[in-house]
Image (tube, helix red, strand yellow):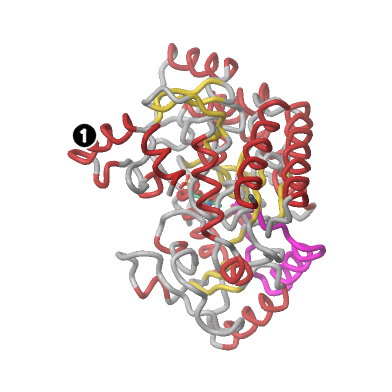
Amino acid sequence: EREEARLNERTGGSGETYSRAQQVLTGGVASSYQARDPWPIYLERGAGPKVWDVDGNEMLDFHNGFGSMVQGHAHPAIGRAISERYAQGTHFAAPTEDAIIVGAELARRWGLPKWRYTNSGSEATMDAIRIARAHTGRDDVLKIFGSYHGHHDTVMVSIGVAYDAIGDRDHLQSLPYGGGIPQSTVDHVHAVHFNDAEAMERKIVALDRDGRKPACVIMEAAMMNLGVVLPQDGYLDEVREITRRHGVVLIFDEVKTGLCIAAGGATERFGVTPDLVTLAKALGGGLPTGAIGGSDEVMQCVEDGTVYQVGTYNGNPLGMAAARANLLEVMTPEAYDHLAMLNDRILAGCRSVIEEFALPGYAVGIGSKGCVTFSPVPVVDYETFKANQDAELCDLAWLFNMNRGIFMTPGREEEWTLSVTHQADHVDRYVEVFREMASDLTR
Ligand code: PLP
């Protein structure tokens, strides 16, 4: 309560903005994920690793637009690319040279030959699932329980978050996340827990027996919407082998991991190549840009016109120019080395605080992403997350950070994203605030 009152005091301007915003924006925000009680924090600007809210509070950004800003705010190279493109026209609904350059770089990084663009992660996963359905001639989809893949109907199922898993491990009931999702869509979506390849195979076999073999498995190779949950040794190899053996298209949703955890995302990092990969967030250097990459075989249905993968703004020149500069000038091998150094440092710092104060939690991360998971046991899937996460501690950590100039992702399922503009003293500040909270808690 003390921290809550303190934040309200510091963000009075956001409170006033909220009153005005409510007159025209539903819930006072542009997206339901931006909502917060008693009001959202309205931001004004960002530069490098910092952001400022409407009250003028300067904060170190560890949220980074849900990981979209791994290159830092207002990066000069991306600014240059956007300005040059702006001067030459921003939209034609016709392909430009940059679309080819970006595609070639993505093909090199992901080892997948064929690419298309979208404007968001949701569009990328929506189109990828359609491609998988067309390629296989099947309707059903298998996902990981608790995983978020965007806001279109098919993937707004079995997300978890709002409810407990229902049913035993082999019979998890599919539930829609919120209203407006047809039951007929929900009926086509099935879920298994992460890090359990045997359950995945049992599910595929059972569905096949019912005449509804799934078109695809859509999953994150490392879960980024339950904090950070890493794949156990061998899990992804088994998933690859099982999906290949059963003729099920494997989609790695790299909207969060792609560009953030390695140059070639989770695909490179874990050495397992899916049939389709989806990218967005960090790809566009802060502009709304997504992509789908695939094998020649799976993308054939788009190539031959069986599947319409379309969108007025797909491959928008402004987004493509930003993505080109981002890929070729900003997210270089040196940038990934820098991010790894910083993440090692922040993780080590958090681990030493956890040990010193015997906190019920652990620090976990990969690439530019990480978090402190307030659970006494390792979280390996949604079930262990739901059963063990100390939600109160998680909420307190957010307030504690915000009051001390650390802008962090809201919600209990998120993680930090470091940017290439962060330096050692920035991550040390994060650890210092964490230490202060631990010391307060144990006093
Ligand atoms: N996939 C994953 C793994 C995500 O985390 C998200 C967004 O958080 C999406 C897809 C959807 O992306 P967007 O919000 O750009 O539609």
Q: Which residue is drawn at 53% across and 69% down?
A: 141
Decide if residue 215 is in sight here. no
Q: Name the residue under label 1.
A: 20
Find residue 212 and report its horizontal and vertical position in percent.
53, 80
Hey, which quadrant is residue 282 in on the image? top right
Q: Is 406 above or below relative to 141?
A: above
Frontmost residue, 290 versus 44: 44
Q: Which residue is drawn at 54% across and 55% down?
A: 413
On screen, residue 146 versus residue 101, left or right, reads: left
Q: What span is colored magenta in the figure?
A: 228-253
| Count of labels in the image | 1
Q: Is 350 above or below relative to 20?
A: below
Q: State the residue lying farthest toward the left.
A: 23
Verify whether residue 239 appears in magenta.
Answer: yes
On screen, residue 95 versus residue 375, left or right, reads: left
Q: Is 318 above or below relative to 111?
A: above
Find residue 273 and report its horizontal and vertical position in percent.
73, 54
Residue type beneath disc 1 = Arg
On screen, residue 438 versus residue 150, left or right, reads: right
Frontmost residue, 402 versus 122: 402
On screen, residue 230 versus residue 211, left or right, reads: right
Mark 1 CB near ligand 1 (8 Å cut) = no
Verify whether residue 116 appears in magenta.
Answer: no
Q: Residue at x 49, y 26 (%)?
A: 51
Q: State the residue lying farthest toward the front.
A: 443
Decide if residue 76 is in sight here. yes
Find residue 78 and report its horizontal and vertical position in percent.
56, 20
What SS does tag 1 mark? helix
Hey, which quadrant is residue 8 in on the image? top left
Q: Which residue is drawn at 54% across and 65% down?
A: 146
Frontmost residue, 415 versus 131: 415
